[in-house]
Amino acid sequence: MTQPHYEQQYLDLVRRVWSEGDERVDRTGVGTRSLFGAQLRFDLADDAIPLLTTKRVYWKTATREMLWFLTGDTNIRSLVAQGVHIWTDWPLAHYRRETGEDIDRDAFEAAIIADDDFAARWGDLGPVYGKQWVDWPTYEPASDGLFRRGPGINQIAELVESLRTNPGSRRHIFTGWNVADLDSMALPPCHMTYQFHVSDKGLSCQLYQRSCDLGLGFAFNVFSAALLTRMLAQQCDLQARELVWTGGDVHLYLNHDALVEEQLARRPAGSPRLRIARRPASIFDYTVDDFAVEDYAPQAHIAAPVAV
């Protein structure tokens, strides 16, 4: 019997959320249809990569974002300089609220690039993803009952070391969910916790995503998790095996109705592959040019508004 295309499980979940989900008034005020608890599995063997084919996914943008996370940077300036706009809406909304100026995105990004002081004040997102991944804050006692900042914990470096030296461990985990820092973040982490499992030289990843916008964010999230798994596998002399995606609040925004119907009318096809051109010295030394996707012939891009 022919196996269903890997994307079909995603389309089935979209259909179920759209037809059975509870309508909810969410943080953004847009409204969603939502289900709680879902799991999808994607084969990563033989360079397979779970890119959606029923719409174009800009995988280089997702790659640049992942590499940005690994630097620990939290300012959008370096992203904007690379033509990546996916994080701009949050600092832009903050700027508009604080100043009352109805600046458009292009002008805001131009100021971020051109003005160091403007970028430092308005371009920072707070201690989001990458900051927690590679510089988790610690504190140590100082005098008079006070505490001072200690050396940060690089969870990614520790993960690589544990995969290399103790592959059978059940502690191959990193997370961005730092409760003490949540209120300082422009957006608390949605793809929040990653766990890795090694069996017979194969590396699998389970991503827990507390909140998932199926219509927009999901495509980036699963590609990025698969990309990171491939990078870790290469660095640790393992073979990527499987990505297990687990979603908490899995939702579709009500203003995406026409876009959802359009995507559900399409049929998935093709088996894209991710090639890595070289093995750099560390997990932190990859560049976007190290990656190539082959055999990817998606259908037309479906644009969707971001709920901020």
Image (cartoon, helix red, strand yellow):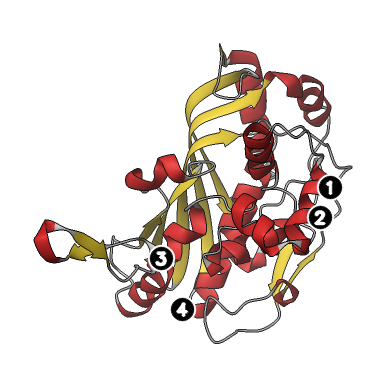
- Estimate the spatial distance between the alpha carbons at disc 2 and disc 1, rounded to whole Å: 6 Å
Q: Is residue 157 visible?
A: yes
Q: Residues within 10 Å of mark 3 (few under 14, many from 20)?
A: some
Q: Secondary structure at mark 4?
A: loop
Q: Position of residue 44 (x, y in %)?
A: 59, 60
- Estimate the spatial distance between the alpha carbons at disc 4 and disc 3, rounded to whole Å: 22 Å
Residue drawn at the location 61% of the way across and 61% of the way down: 66
Q: Earlier in the sequence, mark 4 or mark 3?
A: 3
Task: Please identify, in this view, whether the residue under mark 4 or under mark 3 is nearer the observer.
Answer: 3
Q: Earlier in the sequence, mark 4 or mark 1?
A: 1
Q: Number of labelled discs? A: 4
Q: Earlier in the sequence, mark 2 or mark 4?
A: 2
Q: Position of residue 37 (x, y in %)?
A: 46, 30
- Residue type, label 3: Asp
- Estimate the spatial distance between the alpha carbons at disc 3 and disc 2, rounded to whole Å: 29 Å
Q: Secondary structure at mark 1?
A: helix
Q: Which mark is residue 135?
A: 3
Viewer-proximal residue, 84 or 259? 84
| Residue that badge 4 annotates | 236
| Residue that badge 1 annotates | 106
Label 4 near label 2: C-beta < 8 Å? no
Quarter residue 234 falls in: bottom right
- Estimate the spatial distance between the alpha carbons at disc 2 and disc 4, rounded to whole Å: 40 Å
Residue drawn at the location 29% of the way across and 75% of the way down: 166
- Estimate the spatial distance between the alpha carbons at disc 4 and disc 1, rounded to whole Å: 41 Å
| Residue that badge 2 annotates | 110
Q: Earlier in the sequence, mark 3 or mark 2?
A: 2
Label 1 near label 3: C-beta < 8 Å? no
Label 2 near label 3: C-beta < 8 Å? no
Q: Secondary structure at mark 3?
A: helix
